[in-house]
């Protein structure tokens, strides 16, 4: 009898696992609290980059560690239709609440933190002022079907703020900060959601093109798999595929040009990642996105061609919270001890 009960229990367990794996998940973003009201949420995005550039048989190493703290505030929702699809179009505000930068270029450090501005490095005051200009910047984004960014407002104010009255910087930012660049900056993860419900084991791809004007164009393919359900949260596996195309036209206002025929591609083994989605909060709880790039570029400065080999490893870690990563946390008042204690 005991053996029979054991077999039945095993079979029920297998059936339960199979049923759980067959359930479909609709990945959505929750912009409302439990009371149904529009509610902001917060993100911390940390990116670590190690870049080795080989020029004329010399290796130049650059390390960069940047952290951005964002506030996302939903402003408006409206029902919309696209073909046969009915969806909610969201208008949201993204604010850069703060940032921290640590850069080391061949042993020359540059640092800045909006939390501790008095400790900022003065070795490159111009760059530090640029970082200061990023704080409190706001964008208004419209998210359409499947949370695709349809448009971003605030570009002109952003460029004016960062340009600081410099015509050269203003012209450069206008060329590099394309609509594609702004959309990519505003939307680090939601663009990876599938177009429909998925079950464990399903795979899908998302493709986008990032046009950086005179810098060149990046074709990005995100390959995703709904890998598992762990502790009532969904685990997605990610591979990022990147292919670079140099600009065809000579850029105005830049001191260099990347020549046609230059190659820059992602390395599959170093471009894996994971995303954890919480269906209760309808948010991406955390993500780690790795990208390894390998390239051979020809950079033209004046009339001189310079061969450059690039090896870059980048890791982006994203976490989400109901409370700000920057605002001071409330302290719990202490109760004084009774007299004589």
Image: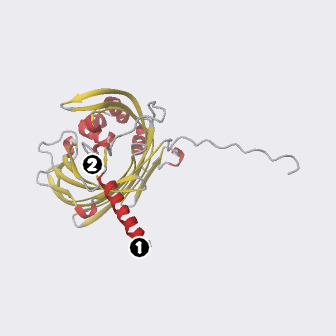
Judging depth in this view, the residue of 117 and 41 nearest the camera is 41
The image quarter in which residue 335 lies: top right
Residue 236, image x and y in percent? 32, 54
Question: Which disc number belongs to residue 3?
Answer: 1
Q: Going by the image, does 153 lie left or right of 69?
A: left
Residue at screen point 34% across, 63% down: 14
Q: Say whether residue 289 is visible.
A: no
Mark 2 — residue? Answer: 198
Residue 214, image x and y in percent? 19, 42
Q: Around disc 1, counting alpha carbons within 10 Å, would you say few (fewer than 14), some (14 to 19), or many (20 or more)? A: few
Q: Going by the image, does 300 lie left or right of 108?
A: left
Q: Going by the image, does 192 lie left or right of 123?
A: left
Q: Which residue lies furthest to the front in this view?
A: 1
Total numbered circles: 2
Is residue 85 placed above or below 4 in the rendered structure?
A: above
Residue 260, image x and y in percent? 11, 51
Is residue 302 placed above or below 314 in the rendered structure?
A: above
Residue at screen point 21% across, 55% down: 241
Residue at screen point 24% across, 53% down: 202
Residue 301, image x and y in percent? 19, 50
Residue at screen point 35% across, 64% down: 11
Q: Say whether residue 278 is visible.
A: yes
Q: Of the residues under marks 2 and 1, which one precedes in the sequence?
A: 1
Judging depth in this view, the residue of 308 and 340 nearest the camera is 340
Q: What element carries label 1?
A: helix
Q: What element carries label 2?
A: strand
């Amino acid at each position: 009898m005991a053996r029979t009960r054991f077999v039945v229990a095993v079979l029920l367990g297998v059936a339960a696992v199979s049923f759980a794996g067959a359930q479909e998940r609709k990945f959505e973003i929750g912009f409302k609290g439990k009371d149904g009201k529009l509610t902001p949420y917060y993100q911390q995005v940390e990116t670590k980059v190690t870049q080795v550039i080989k020029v004329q048989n010399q290796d130049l190493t650059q390390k960069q560690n940047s952290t951005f703290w964002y506030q996302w505030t939903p402003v408006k929702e409206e029902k919309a239709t696209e073909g046969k699809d009915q969806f909610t179009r969201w208008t949201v505000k993204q604010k850069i609440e703060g940032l921290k930068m640590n850069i080391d270029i061949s042993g020359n450090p540059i640092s800045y933190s909006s939390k501790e501005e008095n400790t900022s490095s003065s070795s490159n005051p111009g760059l530090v002022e640029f970082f200061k200009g990023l704080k409190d910047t706001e964008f208004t984004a419209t998210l359409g079907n499947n949370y695709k960014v349809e448009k971003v407002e605030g570009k002109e104010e952003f460029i004016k703020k960062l340009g600081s009255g410099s015509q050269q910087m203003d012209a450069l930012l206008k060329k590099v900060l394309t609509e594609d660049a702004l959309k990519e900056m505003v939307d680090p993860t939601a663009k990876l959601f599938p177009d429909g419900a998925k079950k464990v084991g399903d795979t899908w791809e998302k493709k986008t093109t990032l046009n950086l004007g005179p810098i060149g164009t990046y074709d990005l393919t995100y390959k995703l798999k709904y890998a598992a359900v762990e502790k009532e949260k969904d685990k997605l596996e990610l591979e990022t595929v990147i292919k670079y195309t140099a600009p065809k036209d000579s850029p105005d206002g830049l001191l260099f040009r990347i020549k046609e025929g230059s190659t820059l591609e992602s390395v599959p083994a170093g471009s894996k990642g994971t995303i954890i989605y919480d269906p209760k909060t309808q948010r991406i709880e955390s993500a780690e996105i790795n990208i390894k790039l390998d390239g051979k570029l020809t950079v033209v400065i004046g009339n001189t061609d310079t061969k450059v080999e690039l090896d870059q490893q980048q890791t982006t870690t994203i976490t989400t919270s109901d409370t700000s990563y920057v605002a001071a946390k409330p302290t719990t008042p202490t109760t004084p001890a009774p007299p004589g204690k």
